[in-house]
Amino acid sequence: MAHARVLLVDDSADTRHFLADVLRPAGYDVLTAASGEEGFTLARDLLPDLIIADHQMPGQTGLDMLAALREQDIRLPFILITAQGSEELAARALRLGVGDYLIKPFDVGDLIKATKRVLAEHWQRQIQENVPVRLLQANIELEGRLRELDTLVQIGQRVTGVLDLQTVLREAAQAAVTLAQAEEGSLLLVDPLSGELYLYASTDAELMKAPFRLPVADSLAGRVVRTGESLIITGEDLQTIKPGHTFRALAYVPLVLKGDVIGVLGVTNHTANARFHPHVIQLLSVIADFAAIAIENARLYTRTERERSTLDAILRDTEDTIIVVDAVDNVLFCNPAARKTFDVNILDYRGKPLDEVINHQEVIELFAKQARAGRSRSSEIKIDDGKRVLNAQLTIVEGVGRVVVMQDITHLKELDRIKSDFVTTVSHDLRGPLTAILSYVELINRSGPLNDSQQDFIKRIKFSVQSITALISDLLELGKIEAGFDQDREPTSLRRIVRYAVEGQRHQWEKKQQHVKVRLPEIVPSVLGNPLRLRQLVNNLVENAVKYTPDGGTVTIMAESDGEFLILRVIDTGIGIPQKDQPYIFDKFYRTDQAIDHYQGTGLGLSIVKSIVDQHNGRIWVESEVGKGTTFTVMLPVYDGDAGGDAGDTEA
Ligand code: ADP
């Protein structure tokens, strides 16, 4: 804190110096004057915190000087020093408001004490006189701010709580009027089609009966839209800017949404002569921000509603069966097709557990299996005692739960069955004539000597007949697998099957000088399956790997288990399968161009593999890169309660 300034007035230079030497070490700034007149001038011009003056001075006495200051309405704390005290002098000093009165010779300590006390009393008085007024003012201002804040908070709450935009914006206009202490408030929005401003909400009900439009190019509100800047104008200015205006004062702020001005919030005074304080712009800007949020909310809400009703219509009208459950398997939604298919009669099915709403074991199992496996799953669901078949895909929807969509594939199944029956019958019937052809070809050989080209023709006929026979065998196999004839299941060791496949084709891979590696874990869990079919599965994959891998390449067969599934991989370093062909290679007769041109085959091997995998509730997929190689991965459920196999990695 700055030091208090003391003005010493005494005609004696010794006294002045002496007193200054006493006061300065005590922490006071000291000014001095040698006469009453000089003291008066310094006191008037510099307004010290305290005057210590001698009374007996030639010319103006100490009290005369004080009286002169009082006349000028300058009231400074005052200590009078006198050589001769008298009652009369004391009375006059009291009248003039002297703070203390010291008679010479006085003790230095008394002077310091008097100085401190008079200053303290003076400051105390100052506080008592001034602080309440200031406090009151601050209080009034604070109350005003609180009211403003209150209004802003309220309008903020309305923006998030009320969905009717007209209501929210009318309240925003009303809040603007309250805060700006204006007569009228309105909210204009820019029409995106015409580019004009139109009145959307106003505190003036009459105005709302016939809402007006304003051109953006030639209006004050339009100026706010064009420039993006607020406007605050009084009546006189208005007359010069826009003659004929009836406003006394106006304040406009822009409504900004994502960087674009989409409207204007304004308050006006028609009759009152009150101009708006610049602070009003700040308040209106906050309300304008709220209004812009309300408009954005309303737009989003309308869009979401529209999308929701479109989705509703799609879900309602689709023939697919759709069921949605939440994270704890309570039903959130069943479309009409689902309710019809599964006889959902209860109206308030929402929120009920899935197994209470859907009385169908296969559906419940599908959900349970998916939950265990943790990934999307598909399955066939039979309904109406197996008369209808649905293909169900169950997927996880983040933040919602799970959704199952089922398509009726009854007619596809039927078509497939008819086609398979047909193929089986035809294949079967072809076998007889083919056997006859082959027998007669053999007989030709024995019936007499043949020349070289006849021998060659016969070889070709035999080769073609063998190809057709292989094709027919494959077709018949496929027919049998698809018909599900061999349902016998037993715990089967994959270790032995892999070994058979590798050894069975030793001749082929040795001829091509390929490396065949078998990498199996210590324990290969058994699979509950049909050993014949599982052998066919592994055989086909290894056969393909050897066939489609050039001489000197590598084929690796490896297995691992995660406890639930046995994962078998057949990896080769062969020609690979182009990306575009990969989705189709499990289809019947599908072969890649390279295979057609250079390799013998029926295009049925992988269809057989896929059917076997399906029959064993497994999955199969391919990863491949042209020129680098191919990996087929098969997942088969392990047979629990058994662990199989003997030791270690083997290399062939
Ligand atoms: P194919 O009798 O032609 O081998 P598959 O049904 O076994 O018939 O296989 C279908 C097609 O998939 C093959 O014609 C070939 O184009 C491709 N393919 C299968 N396995 C492999 C592999 N390991 N490497 C490259 N292509 C393969």
Image (tube, rainbow, N blue to C red):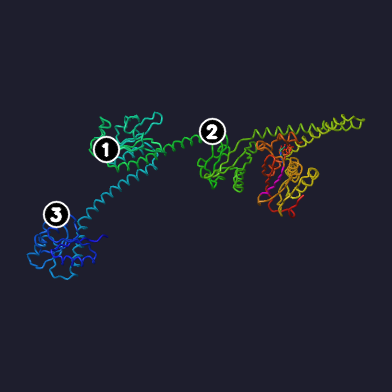
Name the N-terminal-most of marks 1 and 3.
Answer: 3
What is the tally of numbered marks visible in this picture?
3
Is 569 part of what is drawn in magenta?
A: yes
Between residues 354 and 522, which one lies in front from this camera angle?
A: 522
Give the answer, above or below, for where 38 lies relative to 176.
below
Name the N-terminal-most of marks 2 and 3.
Answer: 3
The disc placed on residue 73 is 3
Between residues 569 and 246, which one lies in front from this camera angle?
A: 246
Eye-nearest disc, 1 or 3: 3
Q: Is residue 163 visible?
A: yes
Instruction: Kindly identify the amino acid type of the residue bearing the numbered disc 1.
Output: Glu
Whether label 2 touches label 3, CB < 8 Å: no
Residue where numbered disc 1 is placed: 183
Between residues 634 and 248, which one lies in front from this camera angle?
A: 248
Q: Identify the magenta region.
A: 565-573
Side of 564 relative to 328 (left or right): right
Eye-nearest disc, 2 or 3: 3
Q: Quadrant of ligand 1?
A: top right
Does the Cβ of the disc 1 residue fall within 8 Å of ligand 1?
Answer: no
Where, quadrant-wise, is the N terminus in this rendering? bottom left
Whether label 1 touches label 3, CB < 8 Å: no
Spatial separation of the CA atoms under disc 1 and disc 2: 55 Å
Q: To which quarter of the image does residue 237 belong?
A: top left
Instruction: Kindly identify the amino acid type of the residue bearing the numbered disc 2.
Output: Asp
- Measured as percent of width and height from the top left, residue 645 is found at 74, 53
At mark 2, the secondary structure is helix
Give the answer, above or below, for where 425 lies relative to 511.
above
Neighbour tally class for label 2: few under 14, some 14-19, many 20 plus, Cα within 10 Å = few
At mark 1, the secondary structure is loop
Q: Residue at x 55, y 43 (%)?
A: 397
Residue where numbered disc 2 is placed: 317
